[in-house]
Amino acid sequence: MAVGEARVPILHGERPVHSSSPTKQTEKHHDSSQLEVPRLSRSMTVVTSLVAGASAGALAKTAIAPLDRTKINFQTSQTPYSWRAAVRFMRSSARAEGVVALWRGNSATMARIVPYAAIQLTAHEQWKRVLGVDTPQSAKAYPLLHLMAGSLAGVTSQSATYPLDLARARMAVTNAQEYRTLRAVFVKVAREEGLRTLCRGYPATVLGVIPYAGVAFFTYDSLKHKHLEYFGTQQGPLTNVVFGGIAGAVAQSTSYPLEVVRRRMQTCRPGADGRYNYSTIGATLSLVYRSEGWRGFFKGLSMNWVKGPIAAGISLATYDFIKTTLRDVAVHLES
């Protein structure tokens, strides 16, 4: 269970269970004001989730931006991947354009990740409530619904912010002269390739996010519930980071080939005949396999095992911490 999440049922309207002994009933009758627990409104619950999600996403993505740009560079090219090649790419980028170049495209990432993380983490809470798996007991009783809640949260957030993801990928694999700003990406792509291009790779993204988000949230929540069962207490922030890291590593491994397909479709340009090499999911899978073999579908995965757990750990732990803090403050102000 997350830090402070034991209080969430109260915030959603449940009352604490009290002893039924006559003495305590009498105490309750005479001092009911002390037992009345303040509750957050549903709108305030959603607002705190949105703010916590946006902050967590921004912090996590900024921390791993250089690794993310390096990974995308290898995902979208036929250059063989290795850690030595990855370090070489980061060094050459820093020397040619300055250290700040390692964060190139991060503005597009922030424009996307702030609404994306806010929507995803908030949607996860709401989908769990809708599906009836928002308590440790119900989540354990209905694991498939618990898994589905995470997948639906991922689809919800991806659908709302997809063009920003494409823009971030384009900025990551080009130099500063081609796309100077986020707005320049949208204008140039729409003018030269058409508005529909802003949604290229969306089906692959949805197919990839269903297992990724589902497994990530399911693993994270399951680890928190197991911790609560075994130790009888809520875990601390450091434990949350570790649990988030494990969840990120497991989730990345289940959906990585589709991430490679998504990046190829997002960043490819039309040829002289106006056609795209990576035109569909099937064509992309076939072309990658013919030119690079099965290893091509896992280029950069070892880097994801580093950056993915770091990002997931920071994001999920920060979200729990900020959400709990904001809700404690809101309860205090409303009481």
Image (tube, rainbow, N blue to C red):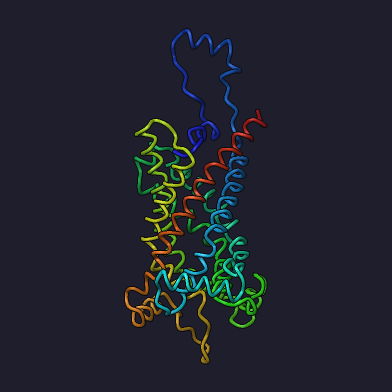
Q: Residue at x 43, y 62 (%)?
A: 304
In the rendered image, residue 61, in percent from the top left (x then y), is placed at 54, 58
In the rendered image, residue 167, in percent from the top left (x then y), is placed at 58, 70
Q: Is residue 154 left or right of residue 332?
A: left
**180 shown above or below 63:** below
**63 shown above or below 105:** above
Q: Residue at x 35, y 79 (%)?
A: 292
In the rendered image, residue 106, in percent from the top left (x then y), is placed at 60, 64
Quadrant where the C terminus sits is top right
**152 shown above or below 105:** above
The mark tally for this picture is 0
In the rendered image, residue 243, in percent from the top left (x then y), is placed at 42, 46
Residue furthest bottom as drawn: 272
Q: Nearer the viewer, residue 28 or 311?
A: 311
Q: Is residue 148 left or right of residue 89?
A: left
Q: Residue at x 37, y 32 (%)?
A: 231
Residue furthest left as drawn: 294
Q: Residue at x 38, y 78 (%)?
A: 288
Residue 140: quadrant of the picture: top left
**301 shown above or below 317:** below
Residue 166: quadrant of the picture: bottom right
Quadrant where the N terminus sits is top left
